[in-house]
Image (cartoon, rainbow, N blue to C red):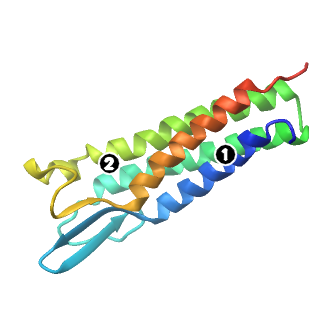
Amino acid sequence: MKKGGVALIGMILALVFIIIAFIGPWYSMSFMGMSIDVGLTTEATSGVDRGPFDTTMYIAIFALITSILAFIGILGLSFGFGSAKTMKSIGGIFGILTFILALIAPLYFMTSAFLEGLGEIGFWNDFGGPGYGWYIMIIAAIIALIASTFIFKEKTTA
């Protein structure tokens, strides 16, 4: 496998998972026979404050951008574009930033004002809980961290 191949595959997976998380529902509510899935790109639903969703969406966009930049750095290392040390640094640093941002997005969402409005019933309750987009963003963060670890472990020559 080429230099950085495992990290390249990992960052592709992280990028795909971030896109899926961006599109999917982040919170699902069910009451009185109705089911509501609210995602980052869902239009305003009556009774749901969009503020925390919008802020989470902006954090997710930054995670998407950093994952693309990490992918470019890892791709450059794998196929010999530019200096190996520079490409390794770009891929690794932006991979770590992807991890941080992809982890901040679901954690912010979980503690946001939208959820404070739920009162004492909390994030996980009988009427609702996180949608698959929320879970997939956490998985994307873990994959980005693993890919960054692999890219930093690559041996480069001057």
Q: Residue at x 32, y 66 (%)?
A: 38
1 and 2 marks in contact (CB < 8 Å): no
In this rendered view, identify the residue nearer to me: 55 or 72.
72
Local packing at callout 2 (Cα closer than 10 Å; few below 14, some 14-19, many 20+) is many
Q: With respect to residue 96, does 17 lie above or below?
A: below
x, y (%) of residue 101?
A: 49, 39
x, y (%) of residue 36?
A: 26, 73
Quarter of the C terminus within the rendering:
top right
Q: Residue at x 52, y 51 (%)?
A: 61
Going by the image, does 134 lie left or right of 29? right
x, y (%) of residue 86?
A: 80, 27
In this rendered view, identify the residue nearer to me: 35 or 93.
35
* Residue named by callout 1: 11
Earlier sequence position, callout 1 versus callout 2: 1
Of tags 1 and 2, the one toward the viewer is: 1
Circle 1: element type = helix
Which amino acid is tagged 2? Phe
Q: Residue at x 45, y 46 (%)?
A: 138
Local packing at callout 1 (Cα closer than 10 Å; few below 14, some 14-19, many 20+) is many
In this rendered view, identify the residue nearer to me: 127 or 54.
127
Which amino acid is tagged 1? Met
Q: With respect to residue 84, does 17 lie above or below?
A: below
Residue 139 visible (yes or no): yes
x, y (%) of residue 41?
A: 42, 66
Going by the image, does 19 lie left or right of 75? left
* Residue named by callout 2: 109
Q: With respect to residue 42, does 146 lie above or below?
A: above
Q: Where, by quadrant of the figure, is residue 132 drawn?
A: bottom left
